[in-house]
Image: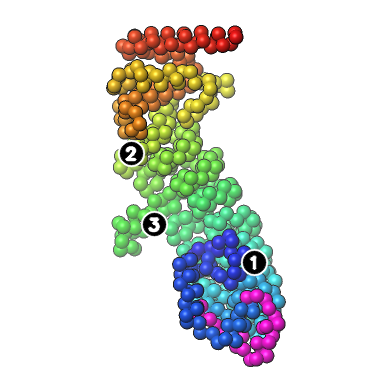
Amino acid sequence: MQGLSDHLRTTLAWSWKGLSKTAKEDAWEKEALVRHDILLPNERSFHAAAKRNNLDIMEQLVEKKVNINAMNSMKRTALHFAVGGNHLSAVEFLLNHKARVDIADKHGLTVLHLAAWFGSLEIMLMLVKAGADQKAKNQDGMTILHFAAQNNNVRIVDYLIQDLHLRELNQQDEKGRKPFLLAAERGHVEMIEKLIELNLLTSEKDKEGNTALHLAAKHGHTSIVEMLITQWQEINQPNEVSYSQEEHPHFELLSVFLQQDSPLHLAIANNHVTLVSRLLGAKHNVDALNQKQQTPLHLAADLGNVELVETLLKTGCDLKAVDKQGKTALAVASRSHHSLIVDMIIKAERYYAWKKDHKEKNYDSPIGPALTFKQDHSLETKQIRSSLWKLAYHQLKAQEWRKLARSWEFLDEQIKAIEEQWSGNNPSSCEHGHRMLLIWLHGILMRRENPERRLYEDLVKAGFPELAEKIRQLQSSTDASSKRCAVS
């Protein structure tokens, strides 16, 4: 069941499409009302007056013996419209004239459901006093506690639990969701706080295997996630549904749709960067696997989201993990043609491999460059980046970049991943060579080495002495020019 749109209160108060049906169904039903309205003229006018809280018209029609419980084609009465519009006077008038409070509309919505949704405690008190069924469910198995929790009506929930002692309403709806899960899915901080205070917190899963934490993570509700991770320790739990071949005749087909995603997977799949950082800060397993054996990095790489990939890479996640297809995150990014992500992952692979071999040295000093795997656009490296561009596009011959890459211990799979993307604007070898050189530069900067000197030395070792000399001469002339500008 979809929730009401945020703008609902500013539209027609009697339009409850978000409570029980899709927009398409609503449009069809509105048309049906025009063509097949079963109301008499006086009854139609009475409904219209209830929608507008027009007591004068309502009084006149009652004197004419109008049926105040008349139902339209949606099985809604004037009381439905008065409650849905939060019209206290109209509700009081109808109850004084013995309007029925037990009628459910086509979707099982009673007037008490509407009062819980729209948050009018005054109207709810009147309806309860009039004998409205407090335990009624709509066609989706939702009680008044579900409606109040889903729409953040804290006063209603407090009244139901503290005054009416209706804890038995805290049950699962047809989707297996208790009110706590609905509030978490909507991101209602006040409601979550109230439900926790009332001891209605639950870590139970719905029929799709989601806990409240999964739902909050999926929809990017950082505040809710922060509250929930303080309530229970198991934050890595996948949204796994247990089915057996005997229990479900279409087990094999069903398993395709059951991803068994952790909260971190869900946050990444929905591009919630801030939430991903918060989950990692709470010690969520950065290498958690879903049903497809995908780590969070696999998902982020497939999406091509630079910020998500950067966040995961900086945690030191497992770069060698393979999914059920035997693909690493690098292979996934390459397959999806995300060249920026490919380069970031290769930078991380080379950086962490180098760091592992130099454990005895401290390279995390605040004096050095901040760890990042994104593209470098800094002014400090503009000159060397310009030199590398000229080297790739004007000096290295076709495929010579591969020889240079191997001299720098680029792995075959890394070279292959670089080669799988090509913008088509320049010769592929130039573009691929340039990307490789920038990846190399990242490692040199992270090691705090002099890139100009190291480039010269490595070109000589790799068998490119003439290129090395050209680079040195170009660097010397550039330095001299910079000094003249500084003097003048």
Q: Which circle, 1 or 3, is nearer the viewer?
A: 1
CA gap between label 1 and label 2 equals 50 Å
What residue is shown with label 2? 335
Amino acid type assigned to the residue bearing label 3 in the image: Ser
Circle 3 SS class? loop
At x 48%, y 39%, the residue is: 308
Q: Is residue 246 left or right of residue 32?
A: left
Q: Position of residue 439 (x, y in %)?
A: 41, 25
Q: Sequence-wise, which precedes: disc 3 or disc 2?
A: 3
Identity of the residue drawn at 60% across and 9% down = 488
Taking the spot 56% from the left edge, 50% from the top edge, the residue there is 221
Tell which tag, 3 or 2, sits nearer the viewer.
2
Residue 208 in the image, given as x and y percentages of width and height: 43, 58
Res. 444 visible in picture: no
Q: What residue lies at 58% left-to-right and 11% top-to-bottom?
A: 486
Mark 1 against mark 2, which lies toward the viewer?
A: 2
Residue 119: image tag: 1
Instruction: Please identify the quarter of the rendering in which residue 462 is found.
Output: top left
What residue does disc 3 label?
242
Q: Position of residue 303 (x, y in %)?
A: 42, 43
